[in-house]
Image (cartoon, rainbow, N blue to C red):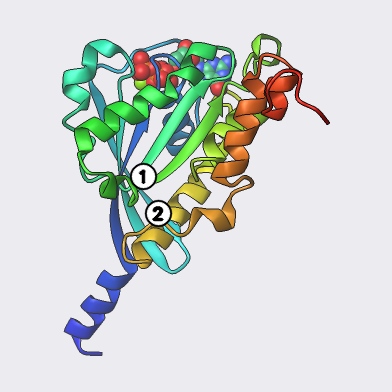
Amino acid sequence: MDTNVQKRRENKKSLRIKVISLGNAEVGKSCIIKRYCEKRFVPKYLATIGIDYGVTKVQVRDREIKVNIFDMAGHPFFYEVRNEFYKDSQGVILVYDVGLRESFDALDSWLTEMKQEMGSQANMESIIFVVCANKVDLTKRRVVDESEGRLWAESRGFQYFETSAQSGEGISEMFQAFFSSITDMCENGGKRPNPEVSIGFTKEQADTIRRIRSSKDSWDMLGVKPGATR
Ligand code: GTP
Ligand code: MG
């Protein structure tokens, strides 16, 4: 075969992507990546200083994907370092610790920080997000349940996974789905495929569920004024 034709075919099959990890300090971002790339778990906490960078190769269908992983430090102190690295990401792994409510509540501010650094909304539409509810092995200290985490993720069109870097639960499933969605997006001209197809709740359903959960009484839950007739 003509070597140029062969080269073009190989180029079409190979893909380079950039992914980043986001979430509060100590939620387990580095451990999730380490579990996937090195198949091991480190119990001792070694805070990421600024950014950790690594490369790995994965196979999605007939394509070889070269993945550049930027593992961000969650500590607020490293804001200045992090904001350099948001640009040109195709995938984001959002992580929280199921035993720490504030790490779940912080997911919105992580999205805000990212949006601020990225600029236009259009860019956010070309990124695949996955949410990891991490440390599910520590069942006794769990405070954020699955339905709450799943609702937050799926109402935004993000895939939700229950993970444990310690036991390995959910890790390879999460990465497989993540890389395959990124590949689909690249093959779809860089646009996220319609989230409505894959999610459990529409935006309206999610808003209603959120309203019901936060309502102060039965009137409020039904969305009517106190004393309203049947
Ligand atoms: P920063 O780099 O500071 O942003 O933190 P990080 O999110 O990268 O956290 P890291 O992966 O370093 O993990 C923090 C601590 O949680 C470490 O002591 C880990 O051993 C522990 N840890 C991480 N994932 C799990 C898990 O799934 N289960 C349990 N039991 N511990 C975990
Ligand atoms: Mg880290």
Q: Residues within 10 Å of mark 2 (few under 14, many from 20)?
A: many
Q: Closer to the camera, 17 or 143? A: 143
Q: Is residue 61 above or below residue 143?
A: below
Element carrying mark 1: strand
**Image position of 214 with respect to 200: above or below:** above
- In-image side of 29 versus 11 (left or right): right
Residue 156 x %, y %: 49, 41
Q: 10 and 85: which one is in front? A: 85
Q: Are marks 1 and 2 in contact (CB under 8 Å)?
A: yes
Q: Is residue 145 visible?
A: no
Res 207 quadrant in image: top right
Where does the N terminus fall, quadrant-wise? bottom left
Distance Cα–Cα, label 1 vs label 2? 7 Å
Residue position marked by numbered label 1 in the rendering: 91
Work out whether 29 lies above or below 100: below
Query: Where's residue 55, x and y in %?
Result: 29, 42
Q: As drawn, is 204 to the left or to the right of 67?
A: right
Name the amino acid, label 1.
Answer: Gly
Q: Secondary structure at mark 2?
A: helix
Which residue is at a point 50% across and 45% down the rendered structure image? 157
Is residue 154 placed above or below 209 in the rendered structure?
below
Which residue does the numbered mark 2 point to in the structure image? Answer: 182
Query: What residue type is disc 2 on?
Result: Ile
